[in-house]
Amino acid sequence: MAATRELTFKDKLVLRVVNPLKGVLKEIWGMTTGKIALLLLSILIAVSVSAALTMPPGFLDSWQSASFWEDNPVIVPPDWVKYFGAKVAPSIVEEKSKPDVTPQWDPSTGILTLTYRFEYTLTDPVFPQDYYFAVYGIKSYDNITPIITISVERPDGVTSVLWQENIFINNTNADVTSIYKTDPKKIKMDDLVSEIFAKYNITVPPNIIGENYMIQAISSSLLRDRVVSKISQPSTALSIFQKPVNVENWVTVLRSEQRPVLEEINNLLKNIRGSISNDPANILPLINNAISNVTFLINNLDKITFSDLYETLQNVSTLLNNAYKLAMSENYPSVVVTNINDAKSRIDKYLDSLKVTVSFIGISPEFEILTGAYRFEVNITYPGVRTYPSNPQSLISYVKFTVKGSVKGTLGTINNGADLATLLYYGFPIALLIGLIASVSSTLIGVIAGIISGYYGGWIDEVIQRIIDILNNIPFLPLMIIIGTAAMKVLPPGTQKSFYIIMLYVAILIIFSWAGLAIVVRSMTLSIKEEPYIEAAKAMGASNTRIIFYHIFPQVMMYAVATLVYNVPSAILTEAGLSVLGLRHGWPTWGAVLAEARAAGPVGYAAWWWILPPGLLLSLTSLTFVLLGLAVEKIVEPRLRTL
């Protein structure tokens, strides 16, 4: 007779855990709902493991910081909306560590130049949100700090310098580096506007302004100011993406606006003439001459130029000034002196308005978005270099060109520029971790408490049942809100605060989730312990622990597993709901993403890409475990297979 071999721990594990688990999985796989659930669960686990392994250091603490996502546009839809006909401006981030041409050095002037070139193509008439250049690791050479010049060649041929600045480095030591980033407020708008004026021949027509040099200068200045104001919308930096249209209609003559003013002045002059009954100083010829000039302007408003209007009114002002001096010297009645002074003051005020405001001419510049390829050039110049450096490329670490377009990434961005796909990806392990910890812990507690309560009975049963009654009668959501709010205020800020708050949520979920399962397991235990084989085990001297773990626990475990899989989505949805209600822990969970949308108000609600993806992931995760629970239920209760 062959000797029997004592089973090792590995053998026992295979017999009692692995083989039964294989059998259960095989049964689950044999059902349609089981197949779908296992496939979805495998995907969730694979993505979660991948996200946990690839999560950048510090991501959990930095994801809410706008500086962490500074290269991303804010609240824009995903790239693929363009395939549905949406007009978009693409987003790009391009870095170059080497110049595009060999560094140039002129020995006669000592100028060393490093040149980097970038291109951005705007295919649709849509503004990007912003763009900027950044130069990292700038070093001095021969105690010389560089000058950065950034220029653009537009699709229409306009070439302009956008930025030109001296780089300041605290220490001119070669090992000390600096960082430069373009400031939209420092863009050389005058250069750009001058180039546009030259390209499109933008001027105030001579037949409108006339030949007066001062009037020409005033009109040109007004035109330029209006163009700068118009092209600077929606921002100064985005002015390069616009071209003028309908230039011939920009300047119009506001003739109808002048008539009431001129008629008012004419009436004042006529009142002066009517108030003079005795004219020893011969003022009336001056007044009549002034009336004649103003009448000429009124009768010829459709013909006169800006210069004609201004020079004629200046002449009228001079006539009134002479009349005023004569009236004062000859002691004319005060009413005459006052009327002359009032008329002169009105004309001078009108002349001043013509000099500082667009009163005679109307200027309405029109621009539209210029599509095509924009070529940018970054020149970093070291003046006065005595010797050519051995490795000029090492003077600059790299140059970065960033355009924040109107679309970004696979799922778009949210209010701080965070890439939504990245947030949801790294939210996978957090969601499953919360769900599994809360569900597994509450299930184990419920099973153990139910078995102990049902098996031992007596005062132990009474204590456990009263605890269950208390937990079932405490309102869970208000208590969670109160505790969560208190925790957010009491816990000190820091990297561990989010972890502590999430663990607090999980702990409360565990405390309030085991009671229902414990009641069911208790009733099952009461029935099982009355079975004959339990009595036989006791008669053979089996301990209570052995009976519980070898005879009762295996029979209730499948029901516990069914409860466990249903509790996982419940825990995940609870965390999401609490985040949306305002109890935000600070980690990038799917609920936290929805909470950010809610906090953003109407802007967040209108961004469909901000709402739908996290909602769909929550629904898909819930569906996975619900389908798995349905499959497990059919194994536990075979009669369900026929339903």
Image (cartoon, grey):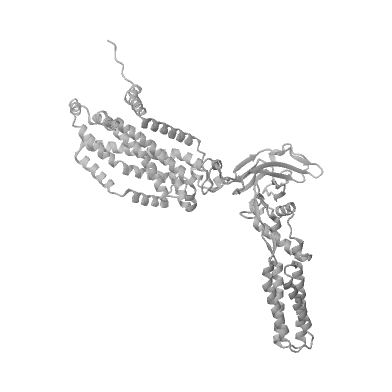
Q: Of 528 and 153, which appears nearest the observer?
A: 153
Residue 498: image quadrant is top left
Q: Residue at x 60, y 48 (%)?
A: 128
Q: Is residue 526 above or below residue 321?
A: above
Q: Of 527 and 44, which appears nearest the observer?
A: 44
- In the image, taking residue 459 as reference, residue 261 lies left or right, namely right
- In the image, taking residue 270 as reference, residue 77 lies left or right, namely left
Q: Residue at x 22, y 37 (%)?
A: 523
Query: Can you give x and y, in whole percent of width and height, for residue 108 in the image?
Result: 82, 43
Q: Residue at x 73, y 72 (%)?
A: 299
Query: Can you give x and y, in whole percent of width and height, for residue 613 in the image?
Result: 46, 42
- In the image, taking residue 127 as reference, residue 142 lies left or right, namely right
Q: How many marks?
A: 0
Q: Is residue 137 above or below residue 345?
A: above
Q: Of 566 and 532, which appears nearest the observer?
A: 566
- Quadrant in which the C terminus is drawn: top left
Query: Can you give x and y, in whole percent of width and height, for residue 555 in the image?
Result: 26, 30
Q: Residue at x 78, y 79 (%)?
A: 289
Q: Is residue 589 visible?
A: no
Query: Can you give x and y, in whole percent of width and height, for residue 411 in the image?
Result: 51, 42
- Quadrant in which the N terminus is drawn: top left
Residue 540: image quadrant is top left
- In the image, taking residue 557 as reference, residue 320 lies left or right, namely right
Q: Residue furthest right?
A: 108
Q: Is residue 615 visible?
A: yes
